[in-house]
Image (cartoon, rainbow, N blue to C red):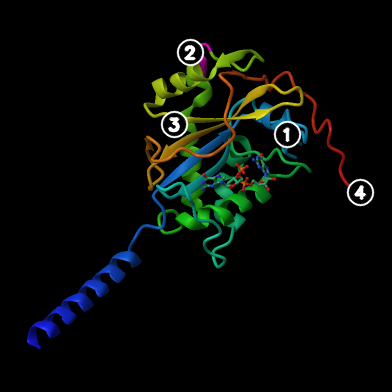
Amino acid sequence: MKGRQSSFVFIKLLVIQSVAALSVARDFDFFYFVQQWPASYCDTKRSCCYPTTGKPAEDFSIHGLWPNYDDGTYPSNCDSDNLFDQSEISDLTERLQKEWPTLACPSGDGYKFWQHEWDKHGTCSENVLNQHSYFQKALDLKSKANLLEALSRSGIRPNGKYYSLDSIKEAIQGALRVSPYIECNVDPSGNHQLYQVYLCVDSSATDFMECPVMPHGRRCGSKIEFPSFSDSDSIGEDYVEEL
Ligand code: 5GP
Ligand code: 5GP
């Protein structure tokens, strides 16, 4: 009887311990830091609209910083009590407009895009980063990655030419010491274009790391176009605002 009682107590302790461990478990394992190439975003059938603050520079821009689990799944919309508050990032607005511009139609000043990204993804890392540090970290990661410079050092430039997928991956891997995931889109003529670059980042949003799992974005052909953004002045070419 005594033996039975002590094993019961032991099991109870084990259960209490596992519940405690679960409650301090991290909310996510790593981030995908995703940057988009504006010319490719615009060169789709849906086209794009430049922000109200003007045409963005010819550079990669931030799409998002997304908490993810090692098994490839991810949390979203984690806290409806901590929704986007633009007053918290007023000191970052100018940099965000430059580095995290919105290209969706109709034209906007960026707040709607940042709000979407914070509410959907940012709230899932709120135990590590508050709203201000979430946006600050994303800006810091963009400077640290400096993708355009990394590609350019390998002779890969946004000039409408085709480059091998491997040469693009190698240029980024050579500069950042981690493997990127390259996502392509298809323009109206059926050409594969360099669309988004995913980099994995540790759970404090500080260092790039090898991806525990690769994302499922649209794959590329072996040769992909790197379209120019400085040549394209066509804003919302195919976009007709609904009245
Ligand atoms: P899409 O279907 O265009 O690839 O993705 C739509 C949206 O789903 C993304 O913009 C992002 O908000 C979310 N998403 C897609 N794939 C992932 C992923 O692997 N991890 C995370 N955290 N979010 C993703
Ligand atoms: P996600 O795909 O990250 O879940 O959602 C992106 C949302 O932000 C979509 O509703 C999209 O219309 C909007 N959005 C606004 N500007 C941009 C932009 O420049 N790029 C992307 N990918 N989405 C944008």
Q: Earlier in the sequence, mark 2 or mark 3?
A: 3
> Residue 70 at what x, y percent from top left?
40, 47
Q: CA distance from mark 1 to mark 3?
A: 25 Å
Q: Amino acid at mark 4?
A: Leu
| Secondary element at tag 3 | helix
Query: Does the image show residue 60?
Result: yes
Residue drawn at point x = 34 percent, y = 60 percent: 25
Query: Which residue is under mark 3?
Result: 144
Q: Earlier in the sequence, mark 1 or mark 4?
A: 1
Q: Quadrant of residue 170?
A: top left
Q: Earlier in the sequence, mark 1 or mark 3?
A: 1
Q: Residues within 10 Å of mark 4 (few under 14, many from 20)?
A: few
> Residue 79 at what x, y percent from top left?
53, 64
Front residue of 195/99: it is 195
Q: Amino acid at mark 1?
A: Gly
Residue drawn at point x = 73 percent, y = 28 percent: 43
Q: CA distance from mark 2 to mark 4?
A: 47 Å
Query: Which residue is under mark 2?
Result: 154
Query: Which residue is under mark 1?
Result: 54
Q: Nearer the viewer, mark 3 or mark 4?
A: 4
Query: Does the image show residue 130?
Result: no
* Region in magenta: 151-155
Query: Which residue is under mark 4?
Result: 243
Q: Amino acid at mark 2?
A: Ser
Q: CA distance from mark 3 to mark 4?
A: 42 Å
Q: CA distance from mark 2 to mark 1?
A: 30 Å
| Secondary element at tag 1 | loop
Ligand 2, what quadrant?
A: top right
Instruction: Report if the CB atoms under discs 2 and 4 are less than 8 Å apart.
Output: no
